[in-house]
Structure formats: C-alpha cells, structure tokens
Image: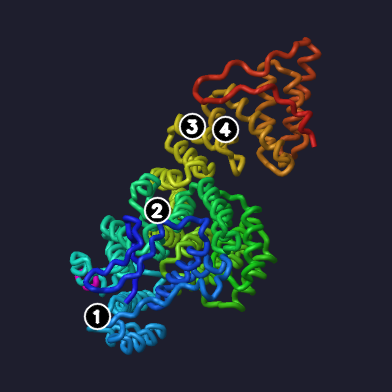
Amino acid sequence: MIILFWDQAGNGSDVTPGGRNYLVLTTNKIHFGDLVQIKKQLISVISLCKERGLLHSAKASELAFALDPLPKDELPPSPPFTEEDAQDLDALTLAKSYFDLKEYDRAAYFLKGCCSQKAYFLYMYSRYLSGEKKKDDETVDSLGPLEKGQVRNEALRELRVELSKKHIAGELDGFTLYLYGVVLRKLDLLKEAVEVFVEAIHALPLHWGAWLELSNLVTNIEMLKSLSLPDCWIKDFFMAHMYTELQMIKEALQKYQSLIEAGFSKSTYIISQIAVAYHNIRDIDQALALFNQLREQDPYRIDNMDTFSNLLYVKGMKPNLSYLAHNLVEIDKYRVETCCVIGNYYSLRSQHEKAALYFQRALKLNPRCLGAWTLMGHEYMEMKNTSAAIQAYRHAIEVNKRDYRAWYGLGQTYEILKMPFYCLYYYRKAHQLRPNDSRMLVALGESYEKLSQQVEAKKCYWRAYSVGDVEKMALLKLAKLHEQLNESDDAAQCYMLYIQDIFSCGEQLEHAEVSTALRYLGQYYFKNKLYDEASLCAQRCCDYNDAREEGKALLRQISQVRDQIETPSADLFAPLSNNTPVRRVSPLNLISFTP
C-alpha cells in the first residue's frame, strides 16, 4: 500500500501510522528551479492515479511530457509493497480488469472485504461509478438529466455513511478523502465538501482531481483567499485555473506566463488554458492563434476544441469550422467536444434543429457538459422555443453557477417574454460575474429603461462606454435616452462621442446609426445657431440614404438663415446638466474623419 502524504512540518521522515508504510513527498521544499524533482513527483502520481482508475492523471502526463526526460538512474523508485497489498493482489488485479471494462458492480463484488488502502478505494469508487452509470441510464432517453433531485445516485448515502466513519477514525488516505469529497458534493453538502477537499489536497498535493473538484466549489475571490492550501508548486497551476474561472484574466495570464518561464514552455495544457483565457476576454485573434499553435503541436487533441469552434463561429469562419468538424469526426465522433463542434457548424449554417440535435447528443454522453447546455439554450432561442431555452440555461447554471453566458441567456429569454423584472435579476447575476463586460451593462441599462428607472439606465450605459464598449451601442442608447428626456445638451454630447468612436474604428460607412446621430446633431447645432457645425452635419447626412433628404432640407434652412443674417460660431456646447457624468470634449471635427 502506498500513498503520498503531505508533511506540514516540512520534514522528510517516513510516517507509519498503524504500522503501515507511507511514502512522503515534501513538495513544499520543491521550487520550480528543481524541475528534476517535479518530474519525479509527476511520474509517481501518474502511476498512483492509473492504479486507481483515475483519469486526472492525463493532465499530470501532459506536464511531465513538457519537461526533459530523466536518465535511468534518476527515475523514481517503485513504491513499497505491503503485506496487505500482497494479500489483495489477486483480487485487485481481477477487479481492476473489470473496472477498466466498466463492469463496476462486478469489480466491487470481488473487492469486498479487501484490507489495503488501494483496494478499499477501488471498491468504494466502483460502487460510486456504478450508481452514476445507473443514474445516467435513467435519463438517456430524455432531453437531458431530469430536474434536480428527481434522479439520484442511489449509492451516495450509503457511501457517505461508510466513508464518514472511516474519516472520523482517521483511516482515509488522500485518494479516499477525494472520493468522500465528491460524494458530499453530489449530496449538496458543499461546506463539508470544501473542507474534505482541502484535507485531501493536504494529504495528497499532487492529485490534480482534488484541486479541480475544489475549484468547482469556489464561488468568489474572498472564498479562494480564505482557503488553507499547501504551499507547493502545483498550487500555482490551481491559482491560474481559478483566476480564469473567476474572470480575473489579467492575473491568470500573468500566472501562466510565470509557469512558462519556470520551465513548462512546452506544455500543451498551459497553451490551451491561455487560449481559453483570451477567449474569455474576447481577444479572438490571439485566442485563434494559440489554438492553431496547439493544433500543430497536438493535431489529434480533442480537449478544448469546442472552445476553438466557438471562436471560429464568432468570426464566421465556415470553411475552418467545417474542416475542424470533419477532422474531429475522423478522430472520435462520439466525444462530447466533437458533438459541440458539429453543433456549432450547423448553427453557423442556420440549421438550428440539427445543431440542437448534436448538442443533445453531447449531453447524453456527458450530462454535466456546461458548454452544451448553454449552446443548446442559444439554439432554442434561435428557434423561438423560449421554454426549452430557459430549461437549458437553468441546467447550465446547475452545472456551474459561474457561467455568465447562462445567466445572460436567461435574461435575453425573459426579455423576449417581456418580463423586465426577471431580465433585471438575471442580467445582474451576469454582470456580477463579468463586471467589466459592456454587453452585460448595456443589457442592464435596457432593463432599467423599460422599468422607467432612467437614472440607473444612464449609469449603466455610461459605465459600458467607460469599460470599452464592444458593440459600440452604449453611447447611442445613452444619447437616445437623453433625447427622450429632453436633455438636449447631454444627448448632443453623447451623439458626438458616439460618432468619434465609430469613426476612429473605421466603421462609419457600415454602421447604420451614424445617420441618426448626425441628423440629431445637425438639428441641435441649428437650434443653437451654430451654423458651421450644423452645415457639416447636414453634409455628412447626405452620405446616408436614410438621412439624405433631411440633410438637404437642413442645408436649405441654413442657407436661408445665412442670407438673412451672418452669425459667428459660438462654443460647441452649453454647460451640460448634472444627470450624467459626461466629460467635456473639444468640438467635433468631422472633416478629419472623412473617408
């Protein structure tokens, strides 16, 4: 029997509770400068995970592959073999073969009564997976998992009782503590689950699965800071992952950059995580470049390819998305990511029924696939099936409450149903998760506007402009709101900033609302007897079909007034009202932005 034990005192001595031999890896003394020791630790934990049927060893394998190979005499020694391991060897070997064939009940049957820690973990894990498999079989013919609480893993309560007794007696190793935490999370005992996962991480710092499970329960940065975690090198990977999950992308990128500099520059895992981080902040070009680099290094990789397909979808790159879909089908057409990629491809072709079908297939393969639930909600929105969209988004939130896309999708759905109070609630949730995302702020502003809360709407629109308006709509909506409230000076200021913003992006010919802004500014300047500026706006109105006649009419009015009296141009704006924190800018020079 062998486990990795975390020695909080930092001592390297062997610990032998109950007369059993323990292998101690004091990771707190290992820094990134000692890559040989890190490689040894990774090789050891990969072996331990594989013996127990845990799939999280794949990430450790990717990290180990990124480091230089060890010479033969530097390879870690084989783990010590105890008397209990020897007694359980035959039963464990037989049960592990059944476990690998996914015959979990059969595996558990032959492990019953075994004494070694390794056999006990596999016995309990087989029972857990058997319950999960039966639960999934009950939902396979439905749209997805039934409503929360209707279908349960029947083995969970028994497992909890047995594991809690062992836990109180202090007989659980790092792997079994991890399983105990999973059982508690499945039973919605989240506070207890967090405590057990932290304990599991202290007992076995290099088990990435325990870190991942803990990450799913951390809801905010305050909770993250309050956790008592071991100070070992793998904590940096966890913190980078958490920063990405909590939308703290700048900190995440800094962390991943430091890991690359520490010696993991060849790690495909880190490249993929950086690409996902850029995807989260909508730096699409940078994310696409990294995913293409990832595909060159690992052409048969399927992990994260659904995120790659989201980027191709947003850019409208239909040939690239088609190639990716065909390529993944050749590799493995029954992977969740493959189904999501095909769904995105059909969605881009506006075949929403087929797209929804493939997202449903993805969910039958993995009912906890967050991306599939969210994307299926989008497809139902396209098909005007609001009730199904609401159900899909709610399932996505059940899987991960930090998914801002699901909260935002629910807000959009209730907006279609003309239920602004519900919209406001869900858009607020999305905004809390993405405080610097202009789309959430604009949506919040629209909800406030529909509820006649104009002051709050103004704040949201201005905040959206201040954080960097992605869709270039915040100033336009703010200007129209000022216009409705007869706040002409503020409206003119916003329209002017809007035009400057659009012109600076080189989008003035493509953006339909520029003519609206020019039309208003022309009338505003004319009323304030600023005929030079009014004339410029009227001339620019003539460049747009929907404003050409009004522009010509305004030019005639200006000409008539000038014939009667010559008026010098005054300052651009009168003092603004105090309703909106709009900064004053120099007069609008449309000539300099003329295409």
Kind of residue at disc 3: Lys
Real-space CA distance between mark 2 and mark 1, rounded to the nearest whole angstrom = 32 Å
Q: Can you give x and y, in whole percent of width and height, for residue 279 in the image?
A: 57, 54
Q: Nearer the viewer, residue 364 or 38?
A: 38
The Cα atoms of the two marked residues, 4 and 3, are separated by 14 Å
Residue 74 appears in view: yes
Mark with earlier residue (2, 4): 2
Q: Quadrant of residue 270?
A: bottom right
Out of 300 and 94, give the one closest to the viewer. 94
Q: Which residue is mark 2?
A: 231
Q: Is residue 538 magenta?
A: no
Amino acid type, label 2: Asp
Mark toward the viewer: 3 or 1 = 1
**Where residue 480 is drawn, which disc sits there?**
4
Split into 4 quadrants, where in the image is the N terminus? bottom left
User: SS at mark 2?
Assistant: loop
Instruction: Work out whether mark 3 precedes mark 2 in sequence or the reverse, and give the earlier one.
Output: 2
* Lower sequence index among marks 4 and 1: 1
Real-space Cα distance between discs 3 and 1?
65 Å
Q: Which label's residue is closer to the chain start, 3 or 1? A: 1
Q: Which residue is mark 3?
A: 459
Q: Look at mark 1 in the image and give the residue it sits on.
A: 115
| Amino acid bearing label 4 | Lys
Residue nearer the viewer, 182 or 453: 182
In the figure, 273 relative to 446: above or below? below
Check disc 3 and report its element: helix, strand or loop.
helix
Q: Nearer the viewer, mark 4 or mark 1?
A: 1
Magenta residues, as a range? Answer: 157-161
